């Protein structure tokens, strides 16, 4: 397997990744490097002015329509939605309507942070909860079909804001980062990509529209009702567009989480997580450990690769330090796996049998009945290409004492935050 000469991504990273033929640096690293204005001529001051003009136009339209809200912000209680709402309220004077699709697989810290966001922002909030019986049917069917028990998350999160926008005549939806661009660089900053119905289906919903599921695995029209996107005519009538803040601001999740911890009391967790050293990202998503473990079982890498690669790109972690995190976390079976198997009505052994045909033969092989990885980034020595691709090291180190609350370091573990949602690992999810 080929690995990026700068970060730790393999050549089979999803949804797609491209390695530069000359230096072996991946498209995700090149996307990240393009954020430096001196390298790609990105004028961040002008981009912020563009964002301000979009906000003013949204306010004007809201006034014309007699609408109390000038935009919608999809929120989960995570660090991104805290930052989006804080920025829109405090810097641009916007009046967003907060919209949450409750997929039912919530963590206690996620529910705490969502309540905190609603309280601190003072914004109105709509939360639609998926029925648990439907969630069970969809999760099991999609696990068997594409190896993903959280398809309904992505479908609901990408659909509900548009349904609310049409219902309430709100033309602007503000998302945070373009996730796939940040990880593997499938678009460029020059593209100024906005949300499209095509990317919703092809990237977020794995190429499967909701109506295609009716009649499969006992799934009914009622089960998929929350995931039916508005018609083209409805979208056009309201003029809805979905923009990504990361096109207008120099995105750095660490800076943003520090901001919302200081300004609005967002809380990371203080316990060691099963799949990553990061203590603040995706902590609201209780099933993320199993979702991420599925990625490892299929493609041979997991969330520690994602998080370590991002730290390497920021110069806060060396390649050697990142490789140690991958070695420690990527193959770990999450403690919550048995709970989600029970929820879907299958055994853990059946879970592994379901995934077996989905393993990528480029990285997995079966030897004497056991699955073994053919390769791993930690089996590759650091050579001339990796040395040449190193980024300048930042004085801000991932595992420094100053970052004790943000990254798990067993030699300097985080202090307890003083409430169970942040301090105790939850084996079960919270539906509400």
Image (cartoon, rainbow, N blue to C red):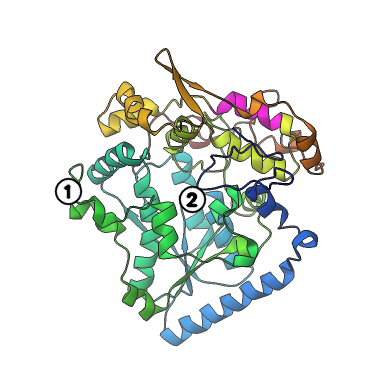
Q: Residues within 10 Å of mark 2 (few under 14, many from 20)?
A: many
Q: Classify the position of the C terminus by image quarter.
A: top left
Q: Residue at x 50, y 63 (%)?
A: 122
What range is drawn magenta here? 321-330
Q: Is residue 18 above or below residue 38?
A: above
The answer, for residue 100, to whether it is visible in the render is no
Question: Image point 74% across, 44% down: which residue?
Answer: 23
Between tags 2 and 1, which lies in front? Answer: 1
Relative side of 138 to 198, left or right = left
The image quadrant of residue 311 is top right
Q: Position of residue 264 (x, y in %)?
A: 59, 53
Magenta span has 45?
no
Label disc, if present, on residue 215 of the rendered structure: 1
Q: Nearer the viewer, residue 366 or 63?
A: 366
Work out whether 58 lies above or below 104: below
**Sequence order check: which comes first, mark 2 or mark 1?**
2
Residue occupied by mark 2: 77
């Amino acid at each position: 397997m080929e690995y990026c000469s700068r970060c730790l991504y393999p050549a089979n990273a999803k949804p797609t990744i491209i390695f530069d033929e000359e230096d072996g640096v991946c498209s995700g690293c090149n996307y990240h490097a393009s954020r430096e204005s001196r390298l790609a001529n990105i004028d961040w001051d002008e981009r912020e002015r563009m964002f301000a003009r979009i906000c003013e136009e949204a306010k004007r339209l809201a006034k014309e329509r007699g609408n109390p809200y000038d935009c919608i912000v999809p929120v989960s209680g995570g660090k991104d939605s805290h930052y989006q709402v804080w920025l829109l309220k405090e810097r641009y004077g916007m009046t967003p309507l907060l919209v949450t699709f409750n997929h039912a697989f919530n963590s206690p810290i996620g529910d705490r942070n969502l309540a905190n966001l609603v309280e601190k922002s003072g914004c109105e909030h709509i939360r639609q909860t998926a029925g648990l019986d439907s969630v069970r049917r969809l999760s099991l069917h999609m696990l068997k079909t594409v190896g993903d028990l959280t398809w309904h998350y992505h479908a609901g999160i990408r659909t509900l804001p548009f349904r609310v926008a049409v219902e309430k005549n709100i033309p602007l939806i503000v998302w945070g980062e373009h996730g796939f661009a940040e990880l593997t660089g499938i678009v460029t900053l020059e593209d100024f990509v906005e949300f499209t119905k095509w990317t919703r289906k092809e990237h977020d919903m794995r190429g499967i529209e909701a109506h295609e599921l009716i009649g499969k695995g006992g799934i009914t029209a009622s089960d998929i009702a929350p995931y039916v996107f508005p018609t083209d005519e409805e979208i056009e009538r309201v003029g809805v567009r979905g923009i990504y803040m990361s096109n207008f601001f120099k995105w750095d999740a660490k800076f943003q989480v520090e901001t919302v911890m200081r300004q609005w009391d967002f809380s990371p967790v203080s316990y060691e997580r099963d799949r990553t050293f990061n203590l603040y990202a995706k902590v609201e998503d209780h099933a993320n450990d199993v979702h991420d473990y599925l990625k490892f079982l299929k493609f041979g890498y997991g969330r520690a690769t994602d998080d370590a690669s991002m730290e390497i790109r920021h110069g806060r972690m060396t390649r050697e330090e990142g490789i140690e995190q991958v070695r420690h976390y990527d193959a770990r079976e999450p403690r919550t796996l048995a709970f989600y198997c029970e929820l879907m009505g299958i055994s853990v052994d059946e879970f592994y049998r379901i995934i077996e045909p989905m393993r990528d033969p480029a990285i997995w092989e079966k030897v004497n009945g056991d699955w073994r990885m053919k390769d791993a980034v930690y089996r590759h020595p650091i050579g001339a290409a990796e040395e040449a691709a190193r980024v300048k090291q930042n004085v801000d180190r991932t595992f420094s004492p100053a970052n004790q609350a943000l990254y798990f370091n067993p030699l300097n573990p985080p202090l307890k935050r003083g409430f169970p949602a942040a301090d105790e690992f939850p084996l079960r999810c919270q539906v509400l």
